[in-house]
Image (cartoon, rainbow, N blue to C red):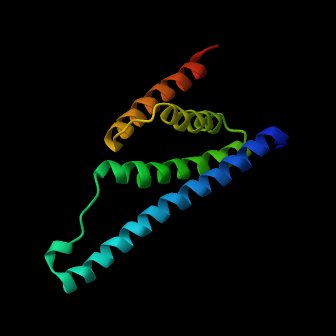
Amino acid sequence: MNVPASVLAAAIGEFLGSIFSLLVSLVFLLSEIDRYHGSKQLVRIYGPASAFHFYNPAFYVVYILLPLLFGLLGIVCAFGLFGLREWARKGTLFLATVPVLVGFFPPTQAKERYLLLEEASILCFLRICSFSLSP
């Protein structure tokens, strides 16, 4: 199968961006695990007042879970683009639209950012479905 150069460039760019997204979320996750293990030692030294405190759950969703999921989806879609699959094109459009929508409307709270991302994902998914249903 002969893949056009533009599709090949898009797939390579998507793959590299997805790897970067995975690395960023893994750095946040590893720093959080390190912070947890460090607080165990602090509790032994300074007592229970220095115990580990979790951040707001929206922090973990926005900075760890979503980049991890978007990175995995991007890698799968990049390999699908190499095979010229229709679902990979739709997934790439989804990944290209949702982060831009969230970036244009920066909320002040992490929980609001999560809700905005959820709404943007639903709207983007409906938009992509409408493209696939049109003749």
Q: How many numbered marks have been drawn onto this rendered protein structure?
A: 0
Say which of 132 and 111 sits in front. Answer: 111
The quarter of the image holding the N terminus is top right
| Residue 49: % across, % down | 15, 73
| Residue 109: % across, % down | 33, 41
Can you name the residue that lies furthest to the left here?
48
Q: Residue at x 61, y 33 (%)?
A: 93
Say which of 105 and 94 sits in front. Answer: 105
Say which of 45 and 117 sits in front. Answer: 45
| Residue 88: % across, % down | 63, 39
Residue 106 figure quarter = top left
Residue 43 figure quarter = bottom left
112 to the left or right of 26? left
96 to the left or right of 53? right
Residue 52 to residue 46: above or below: above
Q: Residue at x 59, y 20 (%)?
A: 131
Q: Residue at x 73, y 42 (%)?
A: 10
Residue 32 to residue 81: above or below: below
3 to the left or right of 45? right
Can you name the residue that lies furthest to the top here?
135
Residue 58 to residue 25: above or below: above
